Amino acid sequence: MKLSAAIKKVSLVFVTIFLCTIFSVGSAFAKDKVYRWKLQSGYPHGDISFELLDGFARDVKKFSDGKLIISVFADSEIVPLEQLFESTQRGLLDMLHCMGAFWGGIVPVGEIEFGIPFAYTIDEVDGFDAKAQVIRDFYYNKGFVNILRKEYDKQGLYWLDMHTYGGPFVLSTKPLENFDDWKGIKIRDEGIYTQFHNMIGARGTYVSGGEAYMALKLGTLDASQWDISAISGLKWYEVAPYWVRAGDNDHVIGHMLINNKSWNELPDNLKQALQKAAENYWTATVEAYGKEFKNAENMIKAGTLKESNVSAQAIKQHKEIAYKLWDEVAKRDEASAEAIKMIKEWRGVK
């Protein structure tokens, strides 16, 4: 009996040591594991926000001590744009970089997130950076981020952070100054802006960024809306020399979305590394786009870009139409209604 008891004690000691060894090895493995992710943008090479993604990936690697490696791909290098959202949901991609307006049919509040016309017109402060900060404060201090994370989570995605593209940048083959000048204009746009442009009398249509130059050159389009990469990277001013300044949003907003499974597999320190890198990316987009807007002003002075200022009366009419559009968007679902109410209170619109 005593021998049997002794054997049991020895066995228990060996089992304990064995289990401790397994847990120690498992813990060390988890600590040393390197995660390799694929991120695809919705934008082509030459787009400012895409070109800045290499810096984001470097920051992630640095802040994670090399434990999270992100490979960056441009539009369609893995999947076409129309499959980007679903491919991230399914885990073919770990992350996407784009804007909510593209997924408005799936996540209606994404239209508002991007910036419905005149929602992000910031008159209370001056300066590109200051206006951007007012919008970021709205996202994080007024609870808008909570709405976005809840809605994207329903789609199996984690909303990581925001970035700016500056304001909507419209280049035209001819001046657009008065309200009637917009009638019949064929303009490349996307999302809610198609509806808005149709409401003001233009003809909104989607053309990929890579095809817009030739469409403007051939007359298939009269004007095209993008961000200021239309000048700095895509060179649309060569075929559409008029910068149409319409008093619209000072910034429009993009995002990074992460497959929920990929996000949840990360230990907390790597999640923090991602968040820190994303915050740096926000700052990088503010700085880069602000610089390019200054360059556009210099191009006007040099005569390589022409300025077309929409009249104050036309802007007033556009704004009144935009507010009607806000009310239509609010009817899409509960999240959109909550977001529009939040924006109206923030901007003082009744």
Image (cartoon, rainbow, N blue to C red):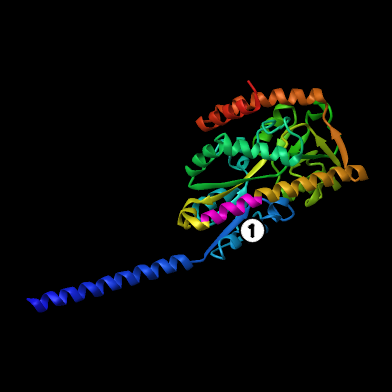
The overriding secondary structure of the stretch rendered in magenta is helix
User: Residue at point 76% right, 38% down?
Assistant: 127
**Residue 49: image location, x then y, percent:** 69, 51
Q: Looking at the image, which residue sits at the far left?
A: 1
**Residue 236: image location, x then y, percent:** 81, 47
Query: Magenta part of the protein: which range?
Result: 271-281
26 above or below 186? below
Amino acid on which disc 1 is placed: Phe
Residue 129 appears in which quarter of the rendering?
Answer: top right
Circle 1 residue: 73
259 above or below 195? below
Q: Is residue 270 left or right of residue 120?
A: left
Count up the numbered dots. Answer: 1
311 above or below 9? above
Decide whether residue 126 is among the magenta residues.
no
**Residue 275: image location, x then y, percent:** 57, 51
Residue 238 is at least partly visible in this image: yes
Quadrant in the picture for the N terminus: bottom left
Quadrant in the picture for the C terminus: top right
User: Residue at point 62% right, 28% down?
Assistant: 346
| Viewer-proximal residue among 7 and 247 | 7
